[in-house]
Amino acid sequence: MKRRLFLGGALAGLAGATGFAVAKDAKGDNMSKPDASKIPDYDRWRLSEKEWKERLSPEAFAVLRREATERPWTSPLNEEKRSGIYACAGCGYHLFRSEHKFDSGTGWPSFFDTIPGALGKKTDFKLVLPRTEYHCARCDGHQGHVFNDGPSPTGLRYCNNGVALAFLPA
């Protein structure tokens, strides 16, 4: 199946910002990152652009390395109901548990919680209004955006690009 991608995630961005506290990185970007010393094989995943292009499909490269957004309703993971783990498609780092997945009706796989320490976050102003973007803590691959309109107990909706995930059945 050929996937179409669009930049900016316009549909996902309409829900608003999350209010996460973030710091500035060396480039002045708002961000929060987990402690790299606690992430297994962190240094192994500092790959060049060429290495990422060789490793990933063009669609996965666009999302994970260029922060593109896949079109809604295109990911087979949107319908995945089995028990298991959702891992980063770039490096295999475990990001979400299947029990945290829910049907948000948005067309993207959505989760109300994460595996602790799995994600780094930064503020994204691509649609003028601030949104909280999140990335894999190990390889820094773009996953999606988080919003404050999810179910209990967190009230959060991690809206993820399916092409950025790999499902590992239990």
Image: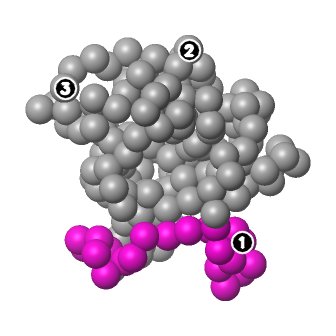
- Residue found at x 59% / y 20%: 106
**Res 163 quadrant in image:** top left
Q: Earlier in the sequence, mark 1 or mark 3?
A: 1
Name the amino acid type tagged 3: Ser
Provide the residue span drawn in magenta: 22-42
Label 3 – label 2 distance at C-alpha: 20 Å
Q: Quadrant of the C terminus?
A: top left
Q: Earlier in the sequence, mark 3 or mark 2?
A: 3
Name the outermost residue toward the front. 153
Asked if one can make out residue 112 in the rendered structure from this viewpoint, the answer is yes
- Under circle 1, the secondary element is loop
Please tell me which residue lies in front, 55 or 35.
Answer: 35
Residue 121 location (% of width, % of height) = 56, 59
Q: Quadrant of the N terminus?
A: top left
Residue 168 location (% of width, % of height) = 20, 36
Please tell me which residue lies in front, 98 or 8.
Answer: 98
Residue 8 location (% of width, % of height) = 74, 42
Label 1 – label 3 distance at C-alpha: 36 Å
How packed is label 1: few (under 14 Cα within 10 Å), some, or many (20 or more)? few
Label 1 – label 2 distance at C-alpha: 31 Å
Residue that label 1 marks = 29
Residue 83 is marked as 3
Residue that label 2 marks = 105
Please tell me which residue lies in front, 152 or 65.
Answer: 152
Q: Are marks 1 and 3 in contact (CB under 8 Å)?
A: no
Q: Earlier in the sequence, mark 1 or mark 2?
A: 1
